[in-house]
Every structure is written in structure tokens, then in C-alpha cells.
Image (spheres, rainbow, N blue to C red):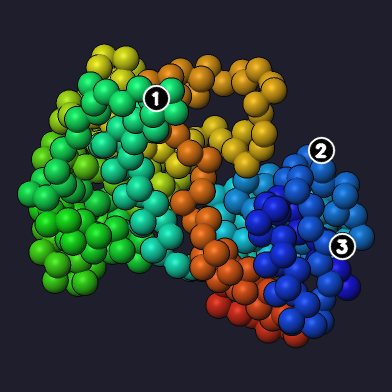
């Protein structure tokens, strides 16, 4: 039996193929296209499919999958806000995800974004390609002694906090529950308004839920320092991008680093360089000199992807053996 894997990046394919070959019970067919209403007919006849976070697993696609014989969906991500779990349950589809992988991959990349915008690295690199070695406009700030606000102090937020502690920063945190490891580093938990108003760097590490959608909105942005640095390596929907653009147009913020975007589906992971991108908000966003946008690559290290693939293979093996593993979101109807 072959597993059909959608949305596989070129770097991922050999890792996926090797992992399934070592498991031995399943073959795998890797596709670069993402699962959507247009591509779902390809899945017909495949009992098990694997998807990425940008797959469309809404009601229409799920019903088409079930009608085509699919019984198990193994998502290669921690997030699952793209899956209609109620419809999957109604259809008797088993759904599993990757509960965790290397938190360091995302935490380190979040700091990469923060430091890149702080020290104007992209602008400097473009200048030197043209043999322009001036320093005008490249002045950044030391992180030591400044304040970082971490929204979400789970495994990734904790890893991000440890790096901040290494920089010698003052640590503020917000979460539904305090992380003792973060408090041991000197983190002080505060309410959101105080965190926004007091932080020089703000980084988001919370899941996208109805309660966190547009956690960063117009009112929140106005609370932040004019020279703050804002970083989002979690989920695009945490930020009201139109409100962010309005603040950037007013000349606010020392830097904004975004690895995710709320309307990234159909854009990120794809080559759109020869097309006209019709998303006016994104087109405006990338024109600001103090903004750095990357294409949802924070997780993309050989370590993290290797763990994601290994967990996905285990999820498939558990399904085949009739076991309900720890990563199941919707259990088998049988």
C-alpha cells in the first residue's frame, strides 16, 4: 500500500522516502502539489494520505477524500487549523498530526528574523552586492539590557526565552499558564497591555485559535513602542495584517519579521515570481524597508523535518496496526 504525500518540498522528499523504506510496511508517493479542491481527485484510491499545513482540508475536500476511499490523513505539522475535524469525525476519517518537533528550529529562526531587521542585514547585503559599503541607515541596537516580551511560553517560547536570557535581556511573558523553566530564568509574567507597552522585542509563540485570532490588532499595535521589533514565526492569523500595514505607513516600528502571513495559502511554498500577485496587502507589506517576510521556513531544519517525518511514519504505522497513537486528533471509526 502506498501513502500519497501532498505538498512535499524537494529537500523533504529523500527524508520521507527513506523513512518509509526503513519502516518497510508502506511505500510512499511524493507530490509537490498541495491538497486542494483542484488536486483532491489525485487521492482517489489511496487509503492513506499525508498533507502539509497549507493543505485545504475543509468540508468539500474531506468529503471528496472519503468518497475516493481515503480513510486516514497524516498531517506533517503541529498546527491543524486547516482541518475541519468535525467533518472528518462525521466521515469516519482518522486524522493524526505531529504533536511536537525541535522547538529550537523555530526559536532560533525567530531570533534570526529579529536580529536581521535590527541590524538591517538584508539592506546591507543588497548594498554590498552593488559594492556600496556605506553604513548610512544600518544602525541597530544592542539586545543586552533591553526587554523582550514572549507571548506563549511553551516549548518554542521557552527556547526563544533561553536565547534572550543569553543576550542578557529583561524577560516578560504572557500565557494561560506560567512555565517554571521561564520563571527560573527571571521571566516576569504580566498582562498583555503591559507586555506590549514595555517590550523592545515582541515575539509570538501561541497557537491559532478563535481566542488568539488577530491577537495583534489595531488597538494592540498602538500600545507598542514606536521603535519596537515585532516577530511572528507561529501562525499568520495572529496578526491583523491590514492594521499592521497602517501602522507601518505611519512610520512606526524599528522592524517587523514575519515568517507567516494570514493569507499565505496558495502563495507560500510556491514560485510566484513570474505571476502578478493579486494580494495587495502582502504586496504593500514587502515594500517597507523595515519589514522582512520569509515563507514559513522557521521549522525547516534537517533536525526538525527529520522528527516530523519520523512521527508521520509512526502515525501511519499505528493506524495500520489498529493502534491509537498519541498524535491522533480524530480516532478511527472502527
Q: Residue 133: x and y, percent?
A: 31, 26
Q: On the image, numbered disc 3 is attached to which residue?
A: 46
Residue 38's mark? 2
Residue in view at x 90 percent, y 55 percent: 44
Q: Residue 41: x and y, percent?
A: 88, 47
SS for tag 1? loop
- Residues under numbered marks 3 and 2 in contact, where contact means CB atoms less than 8 Å apart: no
Looking at the picture, tell me which residue is in the foreground, 71 or 52.
52
Of callouts 3 and 2, the N-terminal one: 2
Q: Quadrant of the N terminus?
A: bottom right
Q: Residue 288: x and y, percent?
A: 38, 21
SS for tag 3? loop
Say how many tags the image has: 3
Q: In the figure, residue 305 lies in which quadrant? A: bottom right
Query: In this rendering, is residue 113 above or below 316?
Result: above
Q: In the figure, residue 88 lies in which quadrant? A: bottom right
Residue 302 visible in the displayed image: yes
Relative to 170, is 8 on the left or the right?
right
- Residues under numbered marks 2 and 1 in contact, where contact means CB atoms less than 8 Å apart: no
Residue in view at x 27 percent, y 50 percent: 151
Residue in view at x 69 percent, y 21 percent: 275
Looking at the picture, tell me which residue is in the foreground, 282 or 288.
288
Front position among marks 2 and 1: 1
Relative to 81, is 201 on the left or the right?
left
Q: On the image, numbered disc 1 is attached to which residue?
A: 131
Of callouts 2 and 1, the N-terminal one: 2
Amino acid at each position: 500500500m502506498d501513502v500519497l504525500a501532498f505538498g512535499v518540498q524537494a529537500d523533504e522528499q529523500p527524508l520521507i522516502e527513506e523513512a518509509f523504506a526503513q519502516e518497510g510496511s508502506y511505500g510512499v508517493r511524493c507530490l509537490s502539489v498541495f491538497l486542494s479542491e483542484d488536486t483532491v481527485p489525485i487521492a482517489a484510491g489511496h487509503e492513506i494520505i499525508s498533507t502539509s499545513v497549507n493543505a485545504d482540508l475543509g468540508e468539500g475536500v474531506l468529503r471528496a477524500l472519503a468518497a475516493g476511499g481515503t480513510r486516514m490523513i497524516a498531517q506533517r505539522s503541529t498546527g491543524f487549523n486547516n482541518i475541519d475535524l468535525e467533518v472528518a469525525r462525521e466521515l469516519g476519517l482518522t486524522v493524526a498530526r505531529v504533536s511536537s518537533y525541535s522547538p529550537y528550529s523555530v526559536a532560533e529562526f525567530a531570533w534570526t528574523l529579529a536580529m536581521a531587521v535590527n541590524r538591517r542585514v538584508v539592506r546591507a547585503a543588497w548594498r554590498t552586492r552593488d559594492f556600496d559599503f556605506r553604513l548610512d541607515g544600518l544602525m541597530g541596537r544592542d539586545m543586552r539590557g533591553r526587554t523582550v516580551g514572549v507571548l506563549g511560553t511553551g516549548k518554542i517560547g521557552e527556547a526563544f526565552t533561553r536565547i534572550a536570557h543569553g543576550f542578557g535581556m529583561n524577560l516578560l511573558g504572557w500565557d494561560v499558564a506560567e512555565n517554571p523553566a521561564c520563571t527560573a530564568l527571571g521571566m516576569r509574567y504580566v498582562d498583555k497591555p503591559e507586555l506590549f507597552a514595555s517590550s523592545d522585542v515582541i515575539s509570538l509563540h501561541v497557537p491559532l485559535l478563535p481566542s488568539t485570532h488577530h491577537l495583534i490588532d489595531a488597538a494592540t499595535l498602538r500600545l507598542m513602542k514606536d521603535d519596537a521589533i515585532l516577530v511572528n514565526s507561529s501562525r499568520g492569523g495572529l496578526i491583523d495584517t491590514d492594521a499592521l500595514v497602517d501602522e507601518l505607513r505611519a512610520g512606526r516600528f524599528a522592524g517587523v519579521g514575519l515568517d507567516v502571513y494570514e493569507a499565505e495559502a496558495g502563495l507560500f511554498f510556491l514560485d510566484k515570481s513570474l505571476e502578478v500577485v493579486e494580494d495587495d496587502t502582502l504586496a504593500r507589506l514587502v515594500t517597507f524597508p523595515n519589514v522582512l517576510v520569509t515563507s514559513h521556513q522557521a521549522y525547516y531544519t534537517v533536525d526538525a523535518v527529520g522528527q516530523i517525518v519520523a512521527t508521520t511514519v509512526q502515525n501511519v504505522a499505528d493506524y495500520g496496526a489498529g493502534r491509537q497513537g498519541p498524535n491522533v486528533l480524530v480516532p478511527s471509526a472502527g
